[in-house]
Image (cartoon, rainbow, N blue to C red):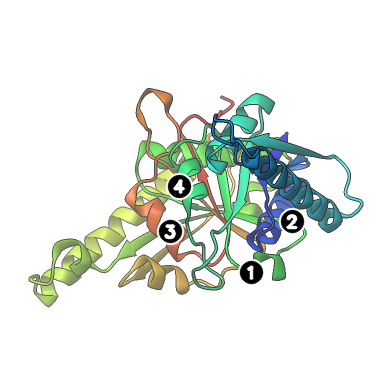
Amino acid sequence: MEILVGVNLGSQSGDALALASALATTLDADLVVANVYPVAYNYVSPAHVDAEWQGFLLEQAEEALAWARQQLGDRDRVSYVIHPHRSSGVGLAEIATARHSQIIVIGSAPGGSSDRIHGGSTSDQLLHGSPVPVAIAPHGYRNWAPAAIARANVAYRPTHESDHCLDVTVEALIRNGFDVSATLLLFTVIERVTRIYGSRLGRHAEDQVLLALREQAEESLAAAIDRVNERVSEPVAISTTILEGDTVTTALSKRNWDDADLIVTGSTGAGPLRRVFLGDMAYKLIRAATIPVMVIPRSAFVTD
């Protein structure tokens, strides 16, 4: 297995490298550290400024990889790649496709709140066009990152995308010899009813709708447990929880996430390519999470 992590000279690269290292340790995977640097436009400057600029960009790419080598120290099974492309996200996807990498890891874009994931052009490109799962580290993750990931927390809803995400996660846990009951948690998020149906609902009606949503969530989580037990050799107990709040952010804050936790969510199929395309809930989870989030595309392989 191979995990690809994108780095540059920005501070967010430390977060990405920490997450990639934890995932590589957990999954016993090779690690590929890559820098995608922008290529020059196809015209010749009379003063050769474009060639000098291209040389500067390549030098920056080499510095980023040198920094990554220093951060990783004597870690083995690591390789380093420099790849030219005008779009960093597209460039990383190209590397993953060419090398058959199984996961792409990136950090948050500059700006945004500490301990949160802040999207940028690279994450947007990958989350709408990656052929493999994409994991994003929140700001500052390098300061508390564990040596390995201890639990996959799958955001579950009764959809084909969630079923596929669950199948991929369980298959990965089984393939790597993990105790599924100890390393898997299923959760469902319920937003306040008035955010869904508007404020014109009366209190009694709101309570009734909320009760119905809870019952549906309990039923879907029970079905998800049955789905997991179809893939394991013997039935196991799976932890589940329902998180409620005025917003997804409030709901997620009601759980004490561990530093070694990872949220896993599915994506919506995007046409015939079946690549990553974020649905509304996945987008909200990414913005609200204070731990890393991995998005599983429909194209991710499942062993039947």
State the mark number for residue 148.
Answer: 2
Helix, strand or loop at disc 2?
A: loop
User: Which residue is at a point 51% across and 62% down the rendered structure image?
Assistant: 117
Amino acid at circle 1:
Gly
State the mark number for residue 140.
Answer: 1
State the mark number for residue 285.
Answer: 3
Amino acid at circle 3:
Leu
Helix, strand or loop at disc 1?
A: loop
Q: Is residue 63 visible?
A: yes
Query: Which comes before the other along the chain, label 3 or label 2?
Result: 2
Mark 4 or 3: the one toward you: 4
Which percent across, then down, holds residue 284? Answer: 38, 59
Observer-nearest of 20 and 58: 58
Look at the numbered discs 3 and 1 and tell me whether their residues touch, using CB distance below 8 Å.
Answer: no
Eyeballing the image, is 211 above or below 70? below
In which quadrant will I find the C terminus? top right
Amino acid at circle 4:
Asp
Eyeballing the image, is 47 above or below 151? above
Mark 1 or 2: the one toward you: 1
State the mark number for residue 124.
Answer: 4
